[in-house]
Amino acid sequence: MAHVAAIVVAAGQGVRAGGDLPKQFRRIWGDTLLQRALSAFAGVPAVSLVQPVIRPDDLTLVRSLTDGMDVLAPVSGGATRQASVRAGLEALEPRKPDIVLVHDAARPFASADLIARAIEAAAQTGAAIPALPVTDTVKRVNQTGTIEATLDRNALRLVQTPQAFAFPPLLEAHRRAATQGRDDFTDDAALAEWAGMKVSVFEGEPGNIKLTTPDDFVRAEAMQAASFGDVRTGSGFDVHAFGPGDHVTLGGIRIPCDNALTGHSDADVALHALTDAILGALADGDIGAHFPPSDPQWRGASSDRFLAFAADRVRARGGLIAHLDLTIVCEFPRISTHRDAMRANIARIAGIDVGRVAVKATTSEKLGFTGRGEGIVAYATATVRLPWG
């Protein structure tokens, strides 16, 4: 059996996609593009090595995103895509793979079937790339905007990644190009052709789109939503009484207060309600069933563990958390100044974008036990998407 490695290139800036981070770190339904791309290859048994190539400045972030994933330690890329691929090849060279797949992190939806076809094609031909037929009419236009020719679309293909090659000749081609100062190849197939390799094509996938612009991300979100048609809604409720202390913990954020909330764990009513809401959407019991108060191991436990557990239960069923909505009812402390920190922390724990988390606060107009300042109530709603079946 061939020894197969994959290089996932994620060393670019991704400025055309917008946002504060390079596009490989933007999230689609919870996971970053880089995580999705790496997971696609790490989940294929025939791929024994997965090599991320990144910007040096992103090392800490990438390590946190890949913690627990079966991938190699990331290596630093270069100023061009070509230089980054070569860095990945050089890092893999001591491990002597037979076949290497080169993939862009900006294509997060490569399927296991596509990866299998890439490996098979490389084993048969030594160099192969996925491609799609061109269905639109294609014109060649000059600099003044005048059409010069209509091209024969039957001879044209739209090229994707992963591109697959026998490892030794691709590494040699990259080294030769570097020696000769050639750094202008936009993909590995072009470099391989320049080096004299014959490159074949195999069937690509329409869903294996490259995300470059903001519109691409909108399209990707819609694609993902369409594949998760079982929409569930769950509700959660929790209440804790005040006792002696100098702070409360809400949404995982420590907030100064003249009292503390009493409870078996850290009494975070916000995270408890959210946990129950997610478990309710899954019809998977409640927080007490999974973390019984009678069990001493949960005494004083940080409630972020409970919310992370519920979020992991969603992912274990192949699902996505679409939205979390939290309402806190109390006379004190004041919540509004901590709302954004709570939203960000809840999003981090649940592994979703902060735009999918709502936190609201109100009083009970001095009515009831909350109005008398005896405790805090939290209500939560979770919207979860699961695959059918």
Image (cartoon, rainbow, N blue to C red):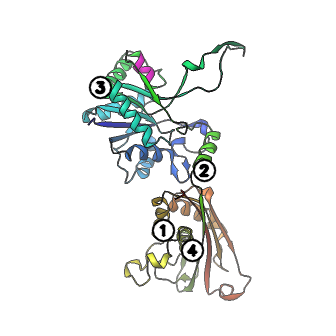
Dot label at residue 273: 4
Q: CA distance from mark 4 to mark 1?
A: 12 Å
Q: Amino acid at mark 3?
A: Pro
Q: Is residue 79 visible?
A: no
Look at the numbered disc 2 and give the secondary structure of its residue.
helix
Chain-order first, disc 2 or disc 4: 2
Q: CA distance from mark 3 to mark 1?
A: 48 Å
Q: Residue 315 magenta-drawn? A: no
Q: CA distance from mark 2 to mark 1?
A: 30 Å
User: Which residue: 72% across, 14% down?
Assistant: 146
Q: Secondary structure at mark 3?
A: helix
Q: Label 4 vs label 3: CA separation? A: 56 Å
Question: Which residue is labeled 3 in the image?
Answer: 168
**Residue under circle 2?**
226
Q: Amino acid at mark 1?
A: Asp
What range is drawn magenta here?
A: 189-193
Tell us which disc is closer to us: 2 or 4.
2
Query: Which residue in the structure is indicated by mark 1?
Result: 304
Quarter of the image where one finds residue 326:
bottom right
Q: Give how far apart the Cα atoms at labels 2 and 4 are.
A: 28 Å
